[in-house]
Amino acid sequence: MNELNRLDLYKEMVRIRQYEARIMQEYHADKAPAWDIGAGLIPGEMHLAAGQEPAAVGVCAHLKKGDAITAPHRPHHFALAHGVAMNAMTAEIYGRTTGLCKGKGGHMHLFDPENHFSCSGIIAQGYPVACGQAFAMKRKGTDHVAVAVAGEGAANQGAFHESLNLAAVWNLPVIFVIEDNDWAISVPRAGSTSITSNADRAAGYGIPGVRVENNDVEAVFEAAGAAIDRARAGEGPSLLEIHTLRLWGHFEGDAQAYRSDLETVDERDPIPKYAAALVESGDLSDAQIQEITAAADAEVDAAIRFATDSPIPTPEDALLHVFA
């Protein structure tokens, strides 16, 4: 297990949050006065991960080059934490030719073979893919691992159960991560899931299952480290459910009238809570908070400039980079 570095965990969470906040600002900037999801420099749906940073940062702190992640439709936090280049990812979100997929995928279909990162808008789609990646890693005799990430609603999909069963039968080096933010779009978990913890479902496949409460990045770090070490040692798959928080809507433009917990959301924000704990322990100062935030803002500004300065694809580009 990697050594815990509290300052690094905090820096990465701030970096992700500043990115998501800026993308939200850019996304909404040219969609007024009448809301039009297809308008603007960033058209289409946008799913942001503010509040869910501890899940990505705590897990990815243990990953190395050659490890793989398959992420869901809310992917930016895991992409950044796993080393996907911010410039190329931002250009993809803006639909530019310098993007990860030449501007053809958009924010829900990021693909970075260099860092073995992918995501999809299809619920639980990444779970079978991660099994395939883990199978290849095992056949090659490496100690690499695959991490499959999905929301708690995806744990009710057939692909979830099929993947856990196959990974257990073949003893694959894969870690299944569930981000439980309490809401599968607008459906509360109690309205769709018969048990209180999806981690309990691991027992049905003979693998370890752990649930991490309180959106605690250090607790995620510890649980993920144990699961990843186990996979690297050839001891097979694990299931990790992280009780996290969706600060904003399911998608940008979501009025969230269905949410009964909105009044308490801000006070549960994991970043200021973690900052306060680090200041109290002496691991962080007010001056460092300002420096870390400024550095993140500068990186995000540069990525936005890179994207907006990049070329827009031509109609002829639609015929490039596709299967014949």
Image (cartoon, grey):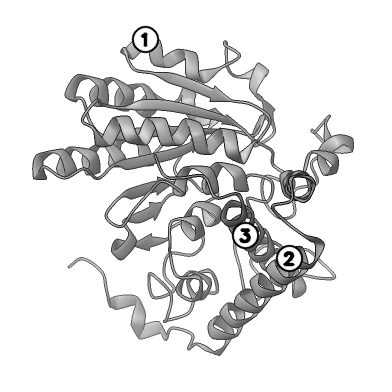
The amino acid marked with disc number 2 is Gln
- In primary-sequence order, the first of circles 1 and 3 is 3
> Residue at point 46% right, 45% down?
3
Q: Is residue 36 left or right of residue 261?
A: left
The amino acid marked with disc number 3 is Lys
Image location (x, y in percent) of residue 305: 60, 85
Image height of 19 relative to 70, above or below: below
Q: Nearer the viewer, mark 2 or mark 1?
A: 2
Q: Quadrant of residue 287?
A: bottom right
What residue is shown with label 2?
288
- In primary-sequence order, the first of circles 3 and 2 is 3
State the residue in front, 220 or 243: 220
The local secondary structure at tag 3 comes to helix
Image location (x, y in percent) of residue 214: 68, 30
What residue is shown with label 1?
204
Image height of 205 relative to 147, above or below: above
Image height of 130 relative to 94, above or below: above
